[in-house]
């Protein structure tokens, strides 16, 4: 991936333009962390980039950034710029293309995200970001208050980087967060959820949650149950969201919503019970058990020991039951299925056609069934 990016830089350089990899990829490269996103900055304008790369595209929502795909890798290339003014503490109203890399870097959020790499793989560190990497410190580029007033999402990004990198927040940055955290309320719930998902899935999620509580950002995020998460061993974002109980406020897709509801139901059950495992599956019971501090290994072993894991595995179908009882379809089919399902799961009935037919005949033959 890096080789493809360096070739891309050389291609831009060959047309007499400057170009560098910038931001998260270089930061992670220096930290020995694998990264899949590569951002490139250049003094070539979008129009000039489109002349170099005819198959590039310019998304309307990302004015000034060109998307180029090379060898199956997607690159976002942004022209050096100054951002003149911000609207609603979030987006720049006006940008001005410039020819100076350092001026472009000054507009960015955190010093650790300003380190660049040229087409030869050389590190360009104009704002001394490597010192912050060595000190494991998150600092803004310039005045922290000004940065948060420009874009309030940077407050959550600061906590996210401190969490996933296990870094500390600079004192000035912390003070600025306390002063401007109310601006978080102006962010969309989708933006907030996106940042929180990254915090909740981090190996250092506990640190991130403690920061959110210490800075009282949980109140601005409207997640009052956040302190409850610290008392659990939850290790998945969907598990955290289940505890937070904000599905009527934050945007969840259909699958996330169903998982949250199932986990909340499974929290009230024995997560090693055959019926609970059968009904909700291994993942839901593992998350619920994880929240309650149970050993996931035991839950997994109980799940693997199930006689059946779905109704399709029962050794008789609806037509077999109807033929056996000489009856037409009706509600009774579900009742019988529920019955034999439970008997098989608790090993009171063997999952064989002959045994199941004998059970049905002995219990239901001649019974008035609806």
Image (tube, rainbow, N blue to C red):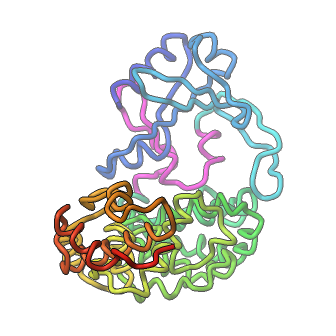
Residue 297 lies in quadrant: bottom left
Could you say where residue 310 lies in the image, as x and y percent from the top left?
32, 61
Between 366 and 143, which is closer to the camera in this rendering?
Answer: 366
Q: Is residue 110 left or right of residue 134?
A: right
Q: Is residue 313 left or right of residue 14?
A: left
Q: Is residue 170 left or right of residue 2?
A: right
Could you say where residue 2 lies in the image, as x and y percent from the top left?
35, 31
- Compared with 68, 252 (above or below) is below
Could you say where residue 267 lies in the image, as x and y percent from the top left?
43, 83
| Residue at (29, 72) in percent of width and height | 360
Between 49 and 221, which is closer to the camera in this rendering?
Answer: 221
Q: Is residue 121 magenta?
A: yes
| Quarter of the image where the N terminus is located | top left
The region drawn magenta spans 102-131
Residue 334 lies in quadrant: bottom left
| Residue at (39, 19) in percent of width and height | 7
């Amino acid at each position: 991936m890096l080789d493809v990016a360096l070739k891309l830089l050389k291609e831009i350089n060959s047309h007499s333009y400057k170009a560098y990899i910038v931001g998260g990829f270089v930061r992670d490269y220096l930290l020995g962390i694998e990264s899949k996103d590569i951002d490139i900055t250049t003094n070539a304008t979008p129009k000039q980039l489109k002349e170099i790369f005819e198959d590039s595209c310019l998304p309307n929502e990302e004015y000034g950034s060109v998307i180029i795909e090379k060898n199956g890798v997607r690159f976002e290339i942004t022209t050096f710029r100054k951002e003149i003014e911000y609207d609603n503490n979030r987006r720049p109203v006006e940008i001005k293309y410039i020819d100076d890399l350092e001026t472009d870097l000054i507009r960015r959020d955190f010093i650790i995200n300003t380190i660049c790499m040229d087409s030869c793989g050389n590190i360009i560190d104009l704002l001394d970001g490597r010192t912050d990497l060595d000190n494991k410190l998150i600092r803004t580029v310039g005045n922290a208050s000004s940065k948060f007033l420009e874009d309030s999402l940077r407050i959550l990004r600061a906590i996210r980087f401190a969490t996933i990198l296990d870094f500390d927040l600079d004192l000035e940055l912390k003070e600025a967060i306390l002063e401007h955290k109310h601006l978080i309320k102006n962010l969309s719930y989708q933006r907030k959820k996106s940042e929180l998902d990254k915090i909740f899935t981090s190996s250092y999620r506990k640190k991130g949650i403690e920061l959110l509580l210490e800075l009282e950002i949980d109140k601005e995020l409207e997640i009052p149950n956040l302190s409850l998460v610290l008392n659990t061993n939850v290790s998945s974002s969907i598990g955290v969201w289940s505890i937070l109980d904000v599905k009527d406020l934050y945007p969840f897709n259909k699958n996330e919503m169903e998982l949250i509801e199932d986990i909340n139901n499974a929290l009230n059950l024995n997560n090693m019970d055959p019926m609970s495992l059968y009904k909700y599956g291994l993942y839901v019971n593992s998350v619920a058990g994880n929240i309650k501090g149970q050993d996931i290994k035991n839950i997994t072993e109980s799940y693997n020991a199930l006689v059946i894991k779905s109704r399709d595995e029962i050794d008789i179908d609806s037509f077999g039951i109807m033929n056996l009882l000489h009856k037409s379809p009706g509600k009774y089919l579900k009742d019988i299925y529920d019955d034999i399902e439970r008997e098989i799961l608790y090993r009171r009935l063997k999952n064989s056609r002959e045994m199941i037919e004998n059970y049905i005949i002995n219990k239901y033959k001649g019974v008035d069934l609806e």
